């Protein structure tokens, strides 16, 4: 215990001396801090894109909702369901009912409309979802925050809050041209920041008429209970009059979007890894310079009895301190540039607009990444400093 206490006292003393000498090595210290700050900012930034996208998508799914598509279709855009098939689906067991006793099974159709980004006037295509009144029983998270719902038979739109914030001509009272007809925005809705806020809603029959369609593309279903999925799926997939696939809402959106989120995460770690190697090389060089500048100090300490271990610990402590400063700066940059902003990415038939939010867990990842760089960057110079014989170091003074 006496030896351990002595080691701790030596480490504390040498580390304090090292930190006090940092202003004398401001240039090399700044290089380490800036390089690590850049790594952390980029890593957190790209991970935030992936995390925000997956959070936006995940918020739109519930375990008690299912989607029915024509068999073999991977997405709504490739599915077509006849009206007779929709009627059969709506009569299946396992479907929940609303206050009026109607099965909550919403036949839906989708189209796209060209719009312009507010920030740079770039062209984009937004999904217009044709729905019935049952869609709002199905998705209670959708709340009209301004205006009203579209009326049956009229060319009216209910616009998601994220879409209205991102694109021109989607504010309340504006008009959007689809198939040569002007559609009026009569309402805005919020959906807890999820995927639906990137869409426009219209009356399904009116939208089908405008696009000269006779079929729906999907039926979204509210299950009677979360355990009713198997009952519903068995009933629909064994019905000889139907040829459909039934998936939970979570499964459907995972298939559609999870791959993109993983790609973004992979890019973050690849880019962060490449930058980390550069930052680590810079840290090694700078720490070598720092040790050279402290040569007299280290040799003197070793000569009066300080252990090699205390020297190693002090060098690593300095490297980790600089890494933490860099991590704090990088995280602050990422938070200032991203938090509260939004970004859109084209997935499938239309863009998904996500609100960016730097999660605390991502900051922790950034700090851990920085500490790893600092530790590895300081380890080799620290070991070299500890291995220099005291007599040799004193002769070089």
Image (spheres, rainbow, N blue to C red):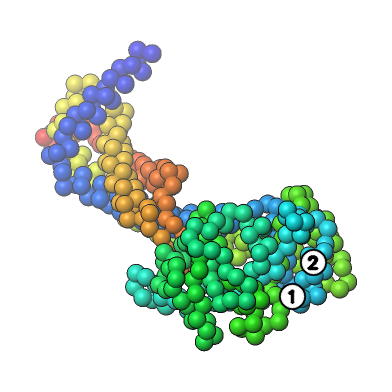
- Classify residue 269 by image quadrant: bottom left
Which residue is pictured at 27% across the width and 24% down the height?
12
Q: Is residue 364 left or right of residue 198?
A: left
State whether residue 179 appears in this view: yes
Work out whether residue 359 or residue 156 is closer to the camera in this orientation and state it.
156
Q: Is residue 127 left or right of residue 65?
A: left
- Image location (x, y in percent) of residue 101: 77, 56
Q: From the image, tell me which residue sits under label 2.
A: 89
Q: Which mark is residue 81?
A: 1
**What secondary structure is found at the residue carrying circle 2?**
helix
**Considering only vertical position in the picture, is 186 above or below 269?**
below
Q: Tell whether label 2 touches label 1 (CB within 8 Å).
A: yes
**Considering only vertical position in the picture, is 168 above or below 138?**
below
**What secondary structure is found at the residue carrying circle 1?**
loop
- Image location (x, y in percent) of residue 184: 49, 74
Work out whether residue 19 or residue 84 is closer to the camera in this orientation and state it.
84
Q: Is residue 305 left or right of residue 141?
A: left
**Considering only vertical position in the picture, is 249 above or below 346?**
above
Which residue is pictured at 23% across the width and 21% down the height?
305
């Amino acid at each position: 215990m006496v030896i351990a206490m002595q080691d701790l006292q030596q480490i504390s003393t040498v580390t304090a001396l090292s930190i006090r000498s940092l202003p004398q090595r401001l240039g090399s210290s700044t290089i380490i801090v800036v390089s690590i700050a850049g790594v952390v900012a980029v890593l957190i930034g790209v991970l935030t894109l992936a995390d925000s996208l997956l959070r936006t998508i995940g918020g739109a799914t519930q375990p008690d909702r299912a989607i029915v598509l024509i068999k073999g279709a991977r997405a709504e855009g490739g599915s077509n369901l006849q009206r007779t098939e929709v009627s059969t689906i709506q009569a299946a067991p396992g479907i929940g009912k609303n206050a009026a006793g109607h099965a909550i099974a919403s036949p839906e159709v989708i189209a796209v409309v060209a719009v312009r980004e507010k920030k740079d006037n770039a062209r984009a295509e937004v999904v217009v979802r044709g729905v019935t009144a049952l869609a709002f029983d199905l998705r209670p998270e959708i709340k009209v925050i301004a205006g009203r719902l579209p009326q049956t038979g009229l060319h009216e739109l209910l616009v998601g809050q994220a879409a209205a914030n991102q694109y021109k001509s989607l504010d309340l009272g504006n008009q959007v041209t689809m198939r040569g007809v002007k559609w009026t925005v009569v309402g805005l809705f919020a959906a807890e920041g999820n995927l639906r806020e990137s869409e426009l809603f219209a009356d399904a029959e009116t939208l089908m008429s405008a696009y000269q369609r006779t079929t729906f593309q999907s039926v979204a279903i509210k299950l009677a209970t979360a355990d009713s999925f198997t009952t519903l799926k068995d009933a629909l997939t064994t019905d000889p009059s139907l040829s459909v696939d039934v998936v939970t809402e979570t499964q459907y959106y995972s298939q559609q979007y999870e791959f993109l989120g993983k790609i973004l995460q992979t890019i973050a770690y690849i880019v962060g890894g490449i930058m980390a190697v550069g930052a680590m090389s810079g840290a090694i060089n700078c720490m070598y310079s720092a040790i050279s500048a402290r040569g007299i100090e280290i040799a003197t300490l070793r000569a009066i009895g300080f252990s090699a271990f205390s020297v190693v610990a002090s060098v690593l402590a300095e490297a980790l301190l600089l890494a933490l400063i860099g991590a704090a700066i990088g995280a602050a940059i990422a938070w200032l540039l991203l938090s509260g902003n939004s970004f859109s990415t084209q997935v499938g038939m239309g863009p998904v607009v996500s609100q960016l939010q730097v999660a605390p867990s991502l900051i922790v990842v950034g700090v851990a990444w920085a500490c790893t760089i600092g530790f590895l960057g300081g380890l080799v110079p620290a070991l070299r400093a500890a291995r220099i014989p005291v007599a040799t170091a004193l002769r070089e003074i």
